[in-house]
Amino acid sequence: MVLAQDAANINSGLAAIGYGLGAIGPGIGVGLIWAAVINGTARQPEAQSKLMGIAWTTFVLVEVLALIGLVVYFIAGG
């Protein structure tokens, strides 16, 4: 009985570490998206509206990956 409880605690800890590591990717992705928008706007200011539309779309896709990771964390026993 005690071994099963210890395994559940280890699984919860591993889920937290996994989500933390999984959140690194979306964090880097968001930084790269907005850095590209800033660079593109600096080079061609008239393209800002197109760049912002693309940026928001890709931002949402990247953040969905982070939210899926959060859901998986809670399913795993977080």
Image (cartoon, rainbow, N blue to C red):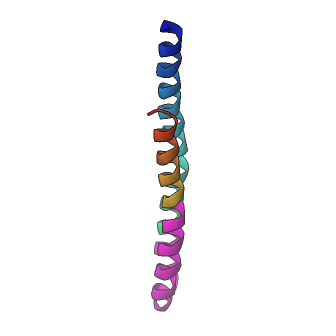
Residue 30 x/y as whole percent: 49, 61
Q: Nearer the viewer, residue 65 or 2?
A: 2
Residue visible at 51% across and 60% down in the picture: 64
Q: Is residue 1 visible?
A: yes
- Region rendered in magenta: 36-62
Q: Main secondary structure of the magenta part?
A: helix
Q: Which quarter of the figure is the C terminus placed in? A: top left
Indicate yes or no whether the magenta region holds residue 48.
yes
Residue visible at 54% across and 44% down in the picture: 22
Residue 18 x/y as whole percent: 54, 36
Q: Nearer the viewer, residue 19 or 54?
A: 19
Q: Is residue 73 above or below residue 50?
A: above
Residue 33 x/y as whole percent: 52, 66
Q: Which residue sits furthest bottom?
A: 46
Q: Which residue sits furthest front?
A: 1
Image quadrant in which you'd find residue 49: bottom left
Q: Nearer the viewer, residue 10 or 2?
A: 2
Q: Nearer the viewer, residue 28 or 5?
A: 5
Q: Is residue 70 above or below residue 54?
A: above
Q: Is residue 44 above or below residue 17?
A: below
Residue 20 x/y as whole percent: 48, 39
